[in-house]
Image (spheres, grey):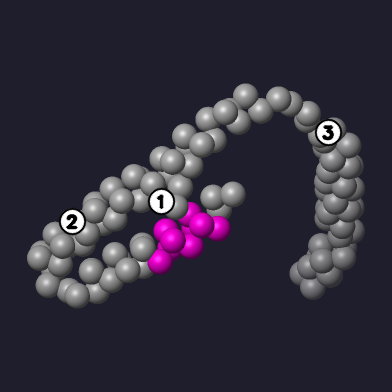
Amino acid sequence: MVKVSTKAIIKTIRNGALYGSIRIKESKIIRLCVASALLSSLVHTAYAVDYLAASKPDVENTFGASSTFKTYLYLAEIVFATITYIKTKNLLALGGVVILAVFLNFALTAFAT
């Protein structure tokens, strides 16, 4: 009868000799590299006609920097901030109007092009 200590079993498991854990990890890395190489080789540039280019002025008038969307959003934010302030009596609820105004001015001017 051969006596095997638990330290020897743990050592062989950590070294990867018992279940081949090192070999399994290496094969997963190799498979991942091969899969990413195959997927990156399938990427091509698409050349297409922009059918929605004619509607760009309409979208800018609706959602642009001087649009009706911005006005209605400000009005809705003021109404909801007032309702929240009345319910909670917290002045920070009105701070959302200022934060929204600053964010919208930045976002609509920066991303409108």
Evaluate whether residue 27 shows in this view. no
Q: Name the residue under label 3.
A: 44
The residue singled out by tag 1 in the image is: 66
Quarter assignment of residue 13:
bottom right
Residue 4 spot, x, y in % from top left: 83, 66
Estimate the x, y position of residue 21 in percent, counting from the top left.
83, 55
Question: Which of the pair 44/82 is nearer the observer?
Answer: 82
Q: What residue type is disc 3 on?
A: His
Query: Can you identify the residue that label 2 sits on?
Result: 79
> How many marks are shown on the rendered structure?
3
In the rendered structure, the answer to whether residue 12 lies left or right of residue 76 reads right
Q: Is mark 3 on a helix, strand or loop?
A: loop
Discs 3, 2 touching: Cβ within 8 Å:
no
For marks 3 and 1, the one nearer the N-term is 3
Contact check, label 3 and label 1, Cβ < 8 Å = no
Residue shown at 41% from the left, 40% from the top: 62
Front residue of 42/8: it is: 42
Depicted 61 relative to depicted 79: above or below? above
Label 3 crowd bin: few (<14), some (14–19), many (20+), radius 10 Å: few
| Quadrant of the rendered image containing residue 44 | top right
- Residue at image position (54%, 35%) is 56
Using residue 64 as the reference point, say whether residue 70 is left or right of it. left
Please identify the residue farthest to the left as the structure is shown.
Answer: 86
User: Mark 1 or 2, which is nearer the eye?
Assistant: 1
Tell whether label 2 touches label 1 (CB within 8 Å).
Answer: no
Tag 2 or tag 1, which sits nearer the N-term?
A: 1
> SS class of the residue under badge 1?
loop
Query: Is-magenta flag for residue 107?
Result: yes
Find the magenta span and give its range: 102-110
- Along the viewing direction, whichever of 37 and 19 lies nearer the viewer: 37
